Image: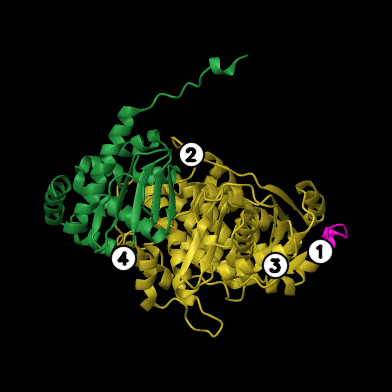
Chain colours: A green, B yellow
Amino acid sequence: MNIDRYPEIPPKDKFIKKAYVAIMLWIVGRAMQAASRVDPVVKEEFSHLRDNFLLRLWVAPNGPSMFVGKDKNGKVKYMGWNPRGKKTTLDMQIKGIEQAVLMFTFQESTAVATSNDRLIVSGDLDDACAIVRILDIVEIFLLPKIITKLAVKRYPKWSQMSPLRKYVGRVLVYIRAFTV
Amino acid sequence: MFLPKYYEFCCRVKTIAGHKALESIAGELDTLGARNPIIITDKGVSGAGLIKIVRTALGKKVKIAAIEDNVPPDSDVSVVNRVAKLYKSKKCDSIIAVGGGSVMDTAKAVNILVSLGGDDLMSYTGAGKVTEKLNPLVVIPTTSGTGSEMTLVAVIADHARKMKMAFTSYFLLPDLAVLDSRMTKTLPPFLTSSTAMDALTHACEAYTCMGKNPLSDAYAIPAIQLISQNVVRAVKKPGDMKARLALANGSALAGVAFSNSMVAIVHNIGHAIGGVCNVPHGVAMGILLPYGLEYNYHKSAHYTADLLYPLAGEEEFINTPLNKRPEKAVAYIRQLNEDLHAATGGRHSRYLKEVVDRDGNQMVPREKFDDIIRTAKGDPAQFYNPEDVDENDYRVMLECAYEGIPLDRKKIKKGKRTSKIRIP
């Protein structure tokens, strides 16, 4: 039997799903950068992270991914998707594209995804906790309440997040995420 | 029955349990191809004569290449490096860990270094970094609490860098866990009670947290039953070998359960209290367990209701209406703490105010609440809690646990109620 006559058939790539997740990661990365400038709570959370902090949030086995970290001046920056030459201090890996789609279409909240072992986290756990809190706030800024309620465990009441902070923050995050 | 859309479960530790289980180790070592094991233990265990029992049970055929009996209660990376050096110099090929959580975690970390090479433990931290089969590891727990004999986790402190390193990998699961009643017979009553409450918390949290699944539930319920029925007996009569063996089994079952479902707010705050105030883990667990269950009533009261059956028995369960079961389960745990307090002559603490060190100083003063809350916010166990915990909630729980009064649920913030049982 000539094995060369039976070439390996690679599985079909899920281009649409990958593209969707890549766009969502880009938006989240940009929004994290924007929120670190406009929201005092997010700013405070980032201020406790180490100087060389670099988060990689990515989908196994080969992307898409996004990097958010502190630059030389200590400013939080979205640092693109390419892992080349980057030394991450916190790695958050979503186990597969299907799991990522569930999360980014809000069919599964971040908390449920974590409980269902969809995520693998490597790095300092203090930093990971801070990032999850930041992601929750960013989601509140980016999304309407009806969708955010699917993504976070407890949607903040007015006493916890004033309407002024929420709506002004939302406008500023959108402007900064898509323009600056 | 709760069935999540997706879950993962793994338990592949061969377990030998019995009043004379130690005698089977020699044969098992042979099967594993282990010829020169090192024994890793601590001073307390060797001082209590337990290593002598293990060596006698191993017989003359098994030659122990080295014994390291100086593992401290809060093991450190320097200890791991020292033991790894001894292992290599004596040309050992396997490890027998005899002790509690610290000894077992140290043994797992040593096994990483001696099996995979290198001397930088840091490079293996995190989830899934250990990707190869390690050398044979046999664990013999001498407390009935941590469940570490069944878990894929090891936590090692790096005191120089002021951090804790967590290692998670299926390759960290021991090859063999040996539960022998003789190994816990000499455990003092107050340590028996606190470690058992630790195991009970593992099982209760495994059953009520977000990561629960049908298989972890199947381990959690008998664990609660064994611990609940035997803990007071073992504390009152330390020589009751049946009760000792039951607790060892309960702890191992609870270990399997929480290893596959994780834990929640009780461990979240407990880790912080341990880190800030050096309160023994089991002591914090016993005090906080009722508060954790009360805090989550609006999310998981229907699961807490189920706990009444293994805790209090069939009759109590049947005679209690559904909507009263959660509160009765919590009341039962509080009563268990009271019974253990009486049985240990007051050494088993019921609330935070009561926790004192050897000199009688209060270990958890109110002034430390801010530090505890700050530390708790950095603990990942919170993610498995059904309710999102904020600073105010932590404070209310700490205040109530300090005074020993039931949780004032009016003062905590609550998200949407998902429990079928309504409790105000």
Q: Tell which tag, 2 or 3, sits nearer the viewer.
A: 3
Q: Are marks 1 and 4 in contact (CB under 8 Å)?
A: no
- Helix, strand or loop under label 3: helix
Q: Are marks 1 and 2 in contact (CB under 8 Å)?
A: no
Q: Which segment did they paint magenta?
A: B53-64
- Helix, strand or loop under label 4: loop
Judging by the rendered image, the residue that carries numbered circle 2 is: B7
Q: Tell which tag, 4 or 3, sits nearer the viewer.
A: 3
Q: Tell which tag, 1 or 4, sits nearer the viewer.
A: 4
Q: Which mark is residue B86?
A: 3
Q: Chain of mark 4?
A: A
Q: Amino acid at mark 1?
A: Arg
Measured Cα–Cα span from mark 1 to mark 4 = 50 Å
Q: Is residue B108 magenta?
A: no
Measured Cα–Cα span from mark 3 to mark 1 = 19 Å
Ranked by sequence position, the earlier of labels 2 and 3 is: 2
Q: Amino acid at mark 3?
A: Leu
